[in-house]
Image: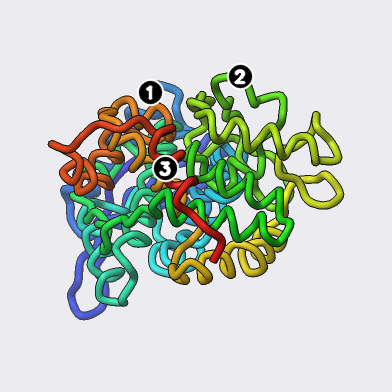
């Protein structure tokens, strides 16, 4: 092992570090300054003394190889299908085209800052930009744990946070009941019960379509699974939770259970009893939910908006952010951030129990 000075054309000088690997093969690495070359020479000497020749080339692999390693060790075994799809979009569209061929040990905080700036200049939204940088951080942290790089270069960078552009507007219980009445008038018993479940238990649509009758108790719903294109998966947060089962919803589910073909299977299955696929969910929204929402005057509403109605019921009843987060499967910080205007709306108002609000809405609603 030694450092050699090499003169190049136009009088430029380069510094080469030479050494032999365990197989006797001559290796060479070139640096622009003597200081960098001496530091590398000392590093290789130290690794050789400790018998760590395997670490001599650590970090020389390009980012795309590190991504594949992270994907196998983490994504394939730890995240849901939908989350993996979101990660794949960030990797394929934004991360690898910009840094895919860069050796991971050459990625420094300055490159991360430049990446964030490039994403912004290219018109990439704040949410996607944030997710792309979080994916990069995960890849680099995984490489650090494997000893391929000394530190995670994303950690010291302040990542621009995505903010909600529009305030959440929950669907009122009267409108929820009008949507439900619209479904019942057309004989859509399953959909009427599904609307109630989304609005009065706060389930994510994927959680509702993954709900099994064995998880419907006398006083609670047990939320164990989510849905991903025809398969049951973990919930979005990878946590099991229980949700308070209010009496009106319990009655709706009991009525629907008497009509369903398989009272021991899924609560809201496809016609063949299986889990909804993505195409099935799209068809359901187009054929059932969208017409019902349009009929009551809220054509811009989404099934997810019914989940916000549940949060509004709990806020009006005086529940705090910690209690609501436990019911909805969010963090207290997310609940406080997303529903802050609803907390202020009911801050000094009369506390009304959710069941009373639902009953009033049900008594006031008529089919559109």
Give neighbour class at mark 1: few <14, some 14-19, many 20+ (Cα, 10 Å).
few
Q: Tell me the mark number nearer the camera, choosing from 1 and 3.
A: 3
Q: What residue sits right under mark 2 in the picture?
A: 218
Is any atom of residue 293 visible in this view?
yes
- The local secondary structure at tag 1 comes to helix
Mark toward the start of the polypeptide (1 vs 3): 1
Colouring convention used in this rendered image of the protein = rainbow
Q: What residue sits right under mark 1 in the picture?
A: 49
Give neighbour class at mark 2: few <14, some 14-19, many 20+ (Cα, 10 Å).
few
Q: What residue sits right under mark 3 in the picture?
A: 360
The quadrant the N terminus occupies is: top left
Which residue is pictured at 71% across the width and 36% down the height? Answer: 255
Residue lying farthest to the bottom in this orientation: 10
In the image: residue 226, left or right of residue 201? right
Question: Where is residue 325 drawn, in percent x and y?
Answer: 36, 31
Q: Tell me the mark number nearer the camera, choosing from 2 and 1.
A: 2
In the image: residue 39, left or right of residue 82? left
Question: Where is residue 309 drawn, in percent x and y?
Answer: 40, 47
Which residue is pictured at 54% across the width and 25% down the height? Answer: 240
Which residue is pictured at 54% across the width and 66% down the height? Answer: 368
Mark toward the start of the polypeptide (2 vs 3): 2
Report the number of discs: 3
């Amino acid at each position: 092992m030694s450092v050699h000075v090499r003169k190049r054309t136009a009088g430029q000088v380069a510094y080469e570090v030479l050494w032999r690997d365990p197989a006797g093969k001559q290796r060479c690495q070139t640096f622009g300054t003597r200081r960098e070359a001496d530091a590398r020479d000392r590093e290789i000497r130290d690794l050789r003394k400790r018998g760590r020749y395997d670490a001599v080339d650590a970090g020389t692999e390009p980012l795309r190889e590190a991504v594949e390693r992270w994907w196998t060790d983490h994504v394939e075994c730890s995240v849901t299908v939908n989350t993996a799809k979101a990660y794949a979009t960030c990797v394929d569209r934004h991360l690898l085209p910009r840094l895919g061929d860069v050796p991971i040990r050459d990625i420094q905080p300055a490159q991360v800052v430049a990446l964030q700036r490039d994403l912004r200049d290219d018109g990439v939204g704040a949410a996607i930009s944030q997710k792309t940088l979080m994916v990069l951080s995960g890849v680099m942290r995984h490489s650090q744990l494997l000893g391929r790089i000394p530190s995670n270069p994303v950690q010291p960078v302040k990542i621009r946070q995505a903010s909600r552009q529009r305030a959440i507007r929950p669907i009122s219980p009267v409108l929820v009941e009008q949507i439900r009445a619209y479904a019942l008038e057309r004989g859509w018993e399953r959909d009427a019960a599904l609307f109630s479940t989304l609005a009065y238990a706060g389930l994510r649509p994927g959680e509702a379509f993954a709900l099994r009758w064995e998880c419907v108790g006398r006083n609670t719903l047990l939320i164990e699974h989510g849905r991903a294109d025809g398969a049951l998966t973990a919930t979005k947060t990878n946590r099991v939770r229980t949700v308070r089962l209010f009496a009106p919803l319990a009655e709706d589910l009991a009525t629907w259970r008497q009509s369903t073909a398989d009272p021991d299977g899924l609560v809201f299955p496809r016609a063949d009893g299986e889990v909804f696929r993505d195409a099935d969910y799209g068809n359901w929204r187009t054929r059932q939910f969208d017409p019902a929402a349009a009929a009551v005057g809220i054509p811009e509403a989404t099934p997810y908006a019914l989940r916000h109605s549940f949060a509004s019921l709990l806020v009006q009843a005086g529940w705090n952010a910690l209690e609501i987060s436990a019911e909805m499967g969010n963090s207290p910080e997310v609940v406080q951030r997303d529903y802050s205007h609803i907390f202020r709306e009911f801050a000094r108002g009369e506390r009304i129990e959710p069941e009373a609000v639902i009953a009033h809405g049900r008594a006031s609603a008529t089919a559109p």
